[in-house]
Structures are given as C-alpha cells and as structure tokens.
Image: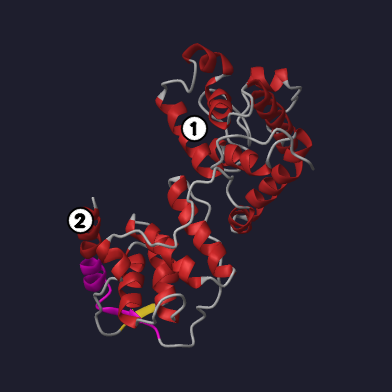
C-alpha cells in the first residue's frame, strides 16, 4: 500500500514538473501567513480529522504536531495535506526549512488544482524531494487520536458558509438559526440541506421533493408546511421531521439520515440502512459532512 502511494506521488511530481515547466517556490513577499480552517468536504472523516487537528495545532502554535498530521493526510493522498505540509516547510514551522521539499509538495498540490498552492509557486529551478515522513511511511509519533466521534468543527463550517454565494449563504444562515429551536445540531441540519439541495430553495426532484430540505407532499402535510417552496416553511418542516427521526432512532445519525432519504418504514424493514444505492450514498455523504455517529440528546438555542 505504501509503495503504491509513493509511486503515485512520484508520478504526480513528474507531471507537476512537466506541466508547470519546473515550478519553484515564490520569493518572500507573498502572503503565506494566514491560517485558515480546512474546507468542509465529504472526504473520509479520518482524513478530514487529520487536517482539522493539524489546523488546531497550528493555531495553538504547535507546528510540529501540525506537520505530523498534515504529513499523515498527504501520505493518504490529500491535496490539502500536501499544500499545508509544503507551506510549513516553506516557512520552517515545526520542520526544518527546506525550499526543495516545499517546492515539491506545493507543485504536486498545484498540479492537482489547489489554488493557494498555485499562488505560491512560479517557474524556477526544478525540485523533486519528498519529506522523510512520506518516504518512510512511518506514522509520526506525535499523532493524536484521529476519530474521536465529534462533529465537524464549527470553524470549518463557518468557513464553508462564508464562501457560499450570497443567496445560498442566507439560506445556510437561516438553517443555523432555526435548527436549535428544533433541538437539532445546526451542523447536522446543514449537512442534510447540503446533501439534499445544496442550499437551492427552488430545487425540485423527479419525485416532486421540493425546496431546501426536499420535502415530498406527504411529509410537508404531516408537518404543517403549506408552501414547500417557501424557504423558511420548508426548513421548519424539514427540521421538525429530522428531530422526529432523531428521537425515533435514539440519536443514531446514520439511521435518521437513511430514514430522511428512504423513509422510516424502509429503515425498519431492513433493520438498518436500506441497501438502495441512492440511500447508501446519501448516508455516506451526510456522515462524512457531520462526522459524529450520534446526535446530542438536547441542543440549546
């Protein structure tokens, strides 16, 4: 497994070198000081947690711990991990400053479409040098527990919301505001809406599911929604249903998500997540976004 990953990394190095005409690290003067939270993606939770733990360590001025986590993510193919580790080598934070290693990692990330990595490289001398932690494949000794069962960090979600177009940002903020009133974690509500409609209030499915939380007519009627295309009515109805499901399935997020997609009857019939391809992928995305397997019993507004 390690050999195949390293072979892939070396292929990326060669591609980056050829495509970018021997990329190199830009001279000092570019803004490389900002430390942003990782993007909210549907990457495997363990990989996302590596990035998020590394970010928290960097903010807490523990760059050595940050480097260890970013290296572990980079070793598993994370473009964001490659960029963040390359940036630490560029700045000499937590690792010995090494422009050649930084250039290699940033070039790989840039070739794979990472915009910030692209902003840190320019045509200079070619560089092909991987850090020891990628070459040896040995897990860093300072690694912390990866899967602690916690939900996605708030700062990751906030960065995602800030980057949304204005209309979708308003919808996401409304979901955040309303969710606690229904005793639903706003992060889970956002994960559901993102998976259902990607914050498009006019979304309509082939099965006539409508709006932000994709309410079918029966569900809309069940929870008192008169106009399913009205964003606030839609979200209130969807949150009421989601809260009912969380109570019914005793806080099991995967079962509640499966029922939201396929109906609680199907979850009961199959005694778990139904074997439907759509539902399986739906649950995978919700769990990847939210991360926590169980929902808190109570949420305070």
Query: Is 215 included in the stretch rendered in magenta?
Result: no
Q: Is residue 146 above or below residue 113?
A: above
Q: What segment carries the magenta color?
A: 13-26
Task: Locate residue 158 relative to residue 108 in the image: left or right.
Answer: right
x then y, percent, for residue 58: 54, 69
In the image, 32: left or right of 2? right
Q: Residue at x 36, y 68 (%)?
A: 110
Query: What residue appears at the point 47 percent right and 52 percent down from the top-left corner?
Result: 48
Above or below — where is 68 with respect to 192? Answer: below
What residue sits 52% from the left and 18% below the top? 267
Residue in the picture at 55% in, 36% down? 293
| Mark sitting earlier along the chain (1/2) | 2
Horizontal relation, residue 72 to residue 192: left or right: left
Between 204 and 87, the one lying in front of the other is 87
**Disc sitting over residue 250 in the figure:** none
**Badge 2 is on which residue?**
3
- Quarter of the image where the C terminus is located: top right
| Disc 1 target residue | 283
For disc 2, the neighbor class at 10 Å (few under 14, some 14 to 19, many from 20) is few
Query: With respect to residue 230, does 49 lie above or below?
Result: below
Task: Say above or below: 103 vs 227.
Answer: below
């Amino acid at each position: 497994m390690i050999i195949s990953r390293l072979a892939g990394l070396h292929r990326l190095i060669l591609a980056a070198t050829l495509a970018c005409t021997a990329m190199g690290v830009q001279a000092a003067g570019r803004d490389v000081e900002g430390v942003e939270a990782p993007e909210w993606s549907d990457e495997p939770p363990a990989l996302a947690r590596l990035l998020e733990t590394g970010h928290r360590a960097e903010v807490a001025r523990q760059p050595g711990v940050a480097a260890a986590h970013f290296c572990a993510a980079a070793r598993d193919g994370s473009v964001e991990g490659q960029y963040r580790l390359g940036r630490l080598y560029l700045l000499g934070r937590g690792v010995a400053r090494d422009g050649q290693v930084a250039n290699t990692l940033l070039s790989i990330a840039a070739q794979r479409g990472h915009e910030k990595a692209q902003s840190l490289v320019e045509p200079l001398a070619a560089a092909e040098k991987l850090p020891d932690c990628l070459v040896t494949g040995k897990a860093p000794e300072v690694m912390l527990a990866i899967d602690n069962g916690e939900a996605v960090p708030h700062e990751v979600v906030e960065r995602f919301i800030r980057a949304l177009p204005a209309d979708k940002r308003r919808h996401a903020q409304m979901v955040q505001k309303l969710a606690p009133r229904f005793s639903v974690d706003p992060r889970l509500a956002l994960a559901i809406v993102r998976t259902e409609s990607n914050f498009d209030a006019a979304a309509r499915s082939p099965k006539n599911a409508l709006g932000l939380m994709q309410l079918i007519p029966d569900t809309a009627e069940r929870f008192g929604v008169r106009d399913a295309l009205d964003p606030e009515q839609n979200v209130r109805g969807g949150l009421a249903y989601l809260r009912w499901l969380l109570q019914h399935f005793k806080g099991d997020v995967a079962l509640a998500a499966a029922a939201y997609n396929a109906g609680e009857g199907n979850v009961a019939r199959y005694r778990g997540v139904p074997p439907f391809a759509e539902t399986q992928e739906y649950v995978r995305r919700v769990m990847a976004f939210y991360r926590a397997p169980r929902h808190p019993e109570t949420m305070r507004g």
